[in-house]
Image (tube, helix red, strand yellow):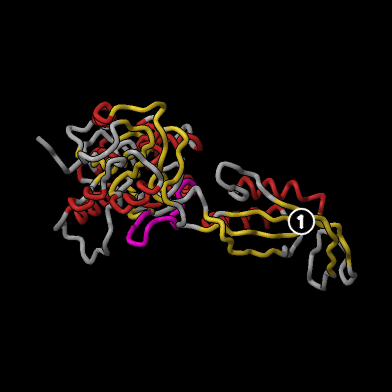
Amino acid sequence: MTKLKEVIKILEEWAPVKLQESYDNSGLQVGRPDAEVERALVSLDITPEVIEEAKNQDCQMIIAHHPLIFKPLKKLTGANIVEECVELAIKYNIALYAIHTNLDNVQTGVNKILADKLGLQETQILQTGKEKLQKLVFYVPHASKEKVVTAMFAAGAGKIGNYDECSFSTQGEGSFRPLEGSQPAIGTTGKRHTEPETRVEMLVQASFVAQVIRAMKQTHPYEEVAYDLFQMQNVNPNIGSGMIGTLASKMPKMEFLQMLKEKLHCSAVQFTKKGPEEIQRVAICGGSGSFLISAAKSAGADAFITGDITYHSYFDASDDFMIVNVGHYESEQFTPEGIIAEIRKKMPTFALLLSTVQTNPVNTL
């Protein structure tokens, strides 16, 4: 039997909750981490119909992109859809988990899922700067270096852009004297000991620091490990908002818009009259992305695709830059598929079901 916290661990290694926006409420919203789960339903939203579907499918957990609870609940009377859903979840003993803006802000999250659906290549984060890297420095006996460094790489250290297992090391000599009560792996109590040591430096994503240090201490032979942690100026290129990439070849503007309608199952798309006649470099943001219009323009995008574009934002278009509103739901509808795929990498035998409930609250004629 699988514990709820085991599923959560996979999700939060992929998109740490620390990366969510300040207004958000990602994470476990209903349920207990130690509860046992056999099946999980994955959906974009949590509605009464989705919870009923989970119950009928014998699921003990719902994983959604959008959080059900954004504001504190002061009572549970079923007076609105949030209260109704919480009551149902408790009644049916179904845990509710949300992976929202933290999944928006990672390189392999919401925007990569959308980019893959649109066939974008050479993708990268559109707007970085949300997180600066940190440098971890520690000392280890020569003979133990490989074991410790390998464990730390596995925990997430040493990743810089499209490179991993990055580190720098120098060799020297360390000294220490074990005191009474110590249990030294090397040396003798009461006598100064000198040991050939390696100084190792590696960059670490802020959200991985705790687990990297834990991996270091668990594999390091010393009872007390000396280490330093420094704030770097390097911006983490794998954390940020939106994404930009290129189509395999240029597409005429109207053909490009038709492709969007077909691939995103849109009944209609809204777009600016201004814009280039051919599209190849494309910026995207799943959900509400008006705040990234200037970033997309500065990055040299021919078109920017997102949802929830406000009226006045359309005036930011130009002769060489088109703005396209495909709808909030339409830009994120494939996120549940990506969540399932990510969990299956680590838990291939865990039962995951894709919700069949249409949760888009917007209809068009």
Location of residue 263 in the rendering, given as x and y in whole percent from the top left corner:
29, 29
Q: Name the residue: 43% across, 34% down.
A: 341
SS at mark 1 in the image:
loop
Between residues 183 and 296, which one lies in front from this camera angle?
296
Q: Is residue 50 visible?
A: no
Relative side of 211 to 115, left or right: right
- State yes or no: residue 18 in magenta: yes
Whether residue 148 is visible to the viewer of this picture, yes or no, is yes
The residue lying at 28 percent from left, 32 percent from top is 277
* Residue 128 vertical placement versus 223 (above, below): above
Within 10 Å of disc 1 (Cα), the crowding (few <14, some 14-19, many 20+) is: some
Query: Can you give x and y, in whole percent of width and height, for residue 224 in the image?
Result: 73, 65
Which quarter shows the C terminus?
Answer: top left
**What residue is shown at x 88% (from left), y 72% (from top)?**
190
In this rendering, would 89 be left or right of 224?
Answer: left
> Toward the viewer: 3 or 138?
138
Give the residue at mark 1.
Answer: 221
Q: Is residue 60 above or below residue 140?
A: above
